[in-house]
Image: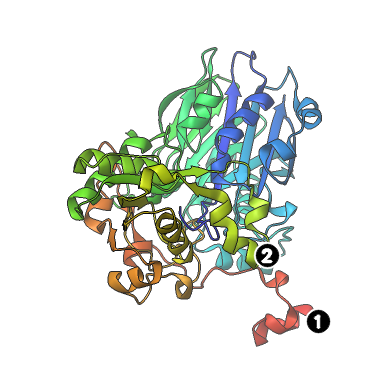
Amino acid sequence: MSDFAYPLHEECGVFGIYDRAGTEDVAAAAYSALYALQHRGQESCGIAVNDDGVINGHRDLGLVNEVFTPAVLASLANPNAHMATGHVRYATAGSRVRANAQPMIVRHGRGTMALCHNGNLTNAIELRRQLENEGAIFHGSSDTEVICYLITRNRLRMGSIETAISKTMDVLEGAYSLVIMSATKLIAVRDPRGYRPLCIGTLPGGGYVFASESCALDAAGATLLRDVEPGEIVVADAKTGELRSIKDHCGRPDTQMCVFEFIYFSRPDSIIEGSSVHEARKQAGRFLAQEHPVEADVVIGVPDSGLDAALGYSQESGIPYGIGFIKNKYIGRTFIQGSQKQRENSVRIKLNVVSSTVKGKRVVLVDDSIVRGTTSARIIKLLRDAGATEVHFMVSAPPFKYPCYFGTDIPDQKLLVATGRTVEQINEVIGADTLGYLSTEHVVQLAKNAKCGFCTACFTGEYAVKPDEVLSTDIHERHLNDRPKDEKKLGE
């Protein structure tokens, strides 16, 4: 993602482990998995551990290695614990406070539940309002807490947690991939349209692992079994040691995984819906070369997700591939969130041009997207300053024109450079010699073996489901003067 000053973020990564053999340190396995999923959320993280039905955990703001110090990990380590869940978060709904960190642990009359959520509900505001009118009390502002409350309420009325989850799914709209841990069960849940990924792995000594991406299975020493189907509830039962499936909500014809999982969000070494993310990104580059052929001397990519697409462009076009940028891996998220001047300078500090690759050459520059366009312009200027004679900018996604309601923090439409502009006008903003975007026709063909449809609403504006109200900051987190007139009385 070229816009380091405003990178897109996918909301979360989820993980769960059930060790049937009792030979794993489940807290350590969760820690390793969250490290592998760190790219999905760098704001907060947490781990919950189940010791024979007693669930405790730790969560906080910060990166995985910041939150889980050796002392904290040691406090979670327990040879009697056979189950654990873990979560990394980046907020797209709900503010950046510790109360919104996950897993969320809920204690109720039937036991304890720990829940991890990836995605965004489109009817969260409506559901929360209904619950509050019935007397519900919320501690945070995320839609995850709404899911927790609904499942808990149904669990108090029903015979099993999986029945309560199925009942809750009847009223949820939007994107949700969940990992839920009860006293004796580890459960994976995916919304009926399958917006966000979720997979199942097996442990060598017996047991199962659930995760947003297969790279987390690798980190935990598990082997990929399959993906959780859209609408499926998968239960790993510690009483029987078996895995079972509930498919009451499966079978929708309009499955819509977020196509940006393949373009940007997921790690290249992950396998999602049967397709390699690395190969999908190379395919994007091949399509770009077919759609936008140019005469050039070298193809380079913007680290990291632009590199695979650049390799594909090179292979298809026959233009040599080169390393054009070195990325500074030691600049953290705190830098990005600094002053405006820091954000403006972030590209020069985060990226440095390998001048010998581009000097005196016609360069094809490949990136996965353009958000605001300002950073893309700075990157192109870096190349020209390093001696590139031409810069042809190729984007391995169509133009962003519309908001996302399913867990991607695409900024306000007014801030998107593609909104209301032609490709030629966008190119005037970024200053390339030519600009080429991947077509909407080809973007849904990147993952050759995928057995699902894809959501492209941020490119086309065609939503399978859209909220009646635009998701916004929780009312209690707004100043009184910023609230609608009919809601100012909440402060009295």
Q: Nearer the viewer, residue 197 or 460?
A: 460
Q: Is residue 358 visible?
A: yes
Q: Nearer the viewer, residue 354 or 146?
A: 354
Secondary element under disc 2, as helix, strand or loop, is loop
Report the quarter where the C terminus lies. bottom right
The answer to whether 93 appears left or right of 138 in the picture is left
The answer to whether 169 appears left or right of 38 in the picture is left
Secondary element under disc 1, as helix, strand or loop, is loop
Label 2: which residue?
Answer: 339
Q: Is residue 256 visible?
A: no
Residue type of the residue flagged with mark 1: Glu
How crowded pointer 2 is (Cα within 10 Å; few <14, some 14-19, many 20+) is rated as few
Q: Nearer the viewer, residue 111 or 292?
A: 292
The answer to whether 443 appears left or right of 475 in the picture is left
Measured as percent of width and height from the top left, residue 379 is found at 45, 57
Q: Is residue 358 above or below residue 268?
A: below
Picture quadrant where residue 109 is located = top right
Picture quadrant where residue 17 is located = top right
Q: Nearer the viewer, residue 229 or 355?
A: 355
Measured as percent of width and height from the top left, residue 252 is found at 32, 49
Picture quadrant where residue 15 is located = top right
The answer to whether 207 appears left or right of 368 in the picture is right
Q: Nearer the viewer, mark 2 or mark 1?
A: 2
Instruction: Tell me the tag on residue 385.
Output: none
Labels 2 and 1: the sequence-earlier one: 2
Residue displayed at 38% across by 62% down: 458
Label 1: which residue?
Answer: 492
Q: Is residue 376 above or below residue 182?
A: below
Residue type of the residue flagged with mark 2: Ser
Q: CA distance from mark 2 to mark 1?
A: 35 Å
